[in-house]
Image (cartoon, rainbow, N blue to C red):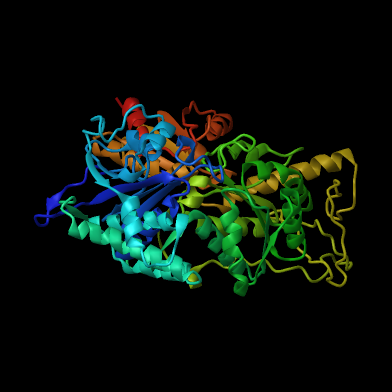
Amino acid sequence: MSEAPTVENVDRDTEELHAVAIRFAGDSGDGMQVAGARFTDASAIFGNDLSTFPNFPAEIRAPAGTLPGVSSFQVHIADRDILTPGDQPDVLVAMNPAALKANLADLAPAGILVINTDAFDERNLEKAGYTSNPLEDGSLDAYRVLKVPMEDLTKKAVEGSGVKGREVLRSKNFLAVGLMAWMFHRPLEPTLTWIADKFAKSPEVRAANEMAFRAGYNLGETTEMFRHTYQVPPARLPAGTYTNVTGNQALAWGLVAAAQAARLPLFYASYPITPASEILHELSRHRNFGVRTFQAEDEIAAAGAALGGAFAGHLGVTGTSGPGLALKSETISLALMTELPLVIVDVQRGGPSTGLPTKTEQSDLLMAMYGRHGEAPLPIVAVSKPSDAFECAIEAARIALKFMTPVILLSDGYIGTSAEPWLLPDLDSLPDISVPFTTEPNTPDGEYLPFLRDETTLARPWAVPGTPGLEHRLGGLEKEDGTGNVSYNPANHERMTMLREGKVAGIAADIPPAEVEGEEGARVLVVGWGSSYGAIAAGVHRVRARGRKVARVHLRHLNPFPANLGEVLGSYDRVLVPELNRGQLWRLIRAEFLVDAERFTKVQGQPFKASEIETRLMEMTE
């Protein structure tokens, strides 16, 4: 199975595996995301380490049965710490011919195919572009094929549930989940509990899904079609309480924790956009923590509202994805000029323009770095994996508040929608990032100067509107140093420009140095950022296992860079920068440090595979 696990015979019918990757694939109306998520949750409760990769079309409803309408969900479960959702699925559940055709090339050699045979009729085969039936022409002989008439079985299973017409077949995804639950010894209770909660207001649908789920499980037990089951034992993870979390969830919870650590109410304003919308959905559930959410009429209004929240003394946050970041750019510049703390979350997706809304990419880095008019440098923090989003959200808020500056927090679609187990942190150990509001005049003569800066951080004081004696004016026009009065003085403009630049550059002294994971004698350094973390780490581990010496560093802070990064880069003969773009960090590194770094890029809307990193590093270390 995946990553060459060792297989041991537990008894005649059950094989124990160290890891397995399962992909559920079907039409976008077949409920594959639900099926994968339910199997994932059951695996998390069972105690496996896991990583997921949801992959679905952007169209609300592409033509049923066609290749553009295929939706899939891959989950990698293991009895050890894993870093990726797996390069290849070991098991492919194909609900129709299009799902088979779109995913078969990814299936591991001799992998298991579970096929819904009822969908392989002449019409669906033609929609998928098949000229012959793969179930009959021998093209699947290299795999272990399990043929299951899922639609017929679902119809029989849900009899008596009360559902009728088209509703009858909607439960076939749960039949597939039930079958996988039997095959991989998953507990039934988590899925049954989820069904009961989710469909509590629709007793017929609840009953149908439960019946289909149990029917799938019982099919495995009662038929001789399946000669083996598989067991992946629980992972040995550090002791503590875990939850299964997506990147968007963890980021939302991190924002809530940041607001608590800052002793401020959180105000999150956004406009719905894939794949960032779940952050708004999640935050809207936490009003008990002082969270205020606002769905604006557009991206510009959302950014303006969030900045207004910051002006009024809130932790102001706005979230979006690629094209939305462009629309917010004028307000981000205004936040820079007014020097108010604002966090801008960008869950990157394939671009440009509306591009690939449901596919991942790391191509907004240069926009985050330079995508504003005038000289407008901003701190940039990047999330590396779903659970890391929690800490990065707090870090972005910390920098914004301490240095009174807008901060861009980069996540992406892969991080935002994928999931992994997360050890719940000790909330009492979170840092205090509160910044006291200014309540008194800050000059000997009793005046309040809104741009009188802290000598170390260059941050200006934060006086919320309505504070007696601290009335002041803010705006986008250039302002006089200290007083904040509008100024067109040439020398003052240059001074203010350099002050803003120096403030951001000075953050380098406030962030941790770059940490290298390496071996003595390594001459090749891999530099990564964002969601390439898992693939790079796994690829480097594989190369080391083959006797090659390679070091790696993964950057959380992209502007400014860690203070020691230049020294680190100069310590290696060759530097490789893998990115899901055409080389944006690669360009920054070459420009900033004059290092002849090499780029390794992928722009397919898909995350890196560990094998791709492994292959490139083997070439470099020959």
Quick check: 497 left or right of 366?
A: right
In the image, 179 versus 452, the foreground residue is 179
Query: Can you give x and y, in whole percent of width and height, for residue 525 in the image?
Result: 40, 35
Quick check: 519 left or right of 62?
A: left
Q: Residue at x 54, y 63 (%)?
A: 253
* Residue 447 is at least partly visible in this image: yes
Quick check: 221 left or right of 282?
A: left
Vertically, is 508 above or below 453? above
Q: Residue at x 26, y 30 (%)?
A: 139
Vertically, is 267 above or below 275? below
Query: Can you give x and y, in whole percent of width and height, for residue 351 in the image?
Result: 59, 36
* Residue 93 is at least partly visible in this image: no
In the image, 374 versus 600, the foreground residue is 600
Vertically, is 518 above or below 573? below
Q: Residue at x 41, y 36 (%)?
A: 123
Query: Can you give x and y, in whole percent of width and height, for residue 334 in the image?
Result: 78, 49
Q: Quadrant of the N terminus?
A: top left
Query: Can you give x and y, in whole percent of width and height, for residue 348 in the image?
Result: 57, 43
In the image, 558 versus 561, the foreground residue is 558
Q: Residue at x 37, y 38 (%)?
A: 97
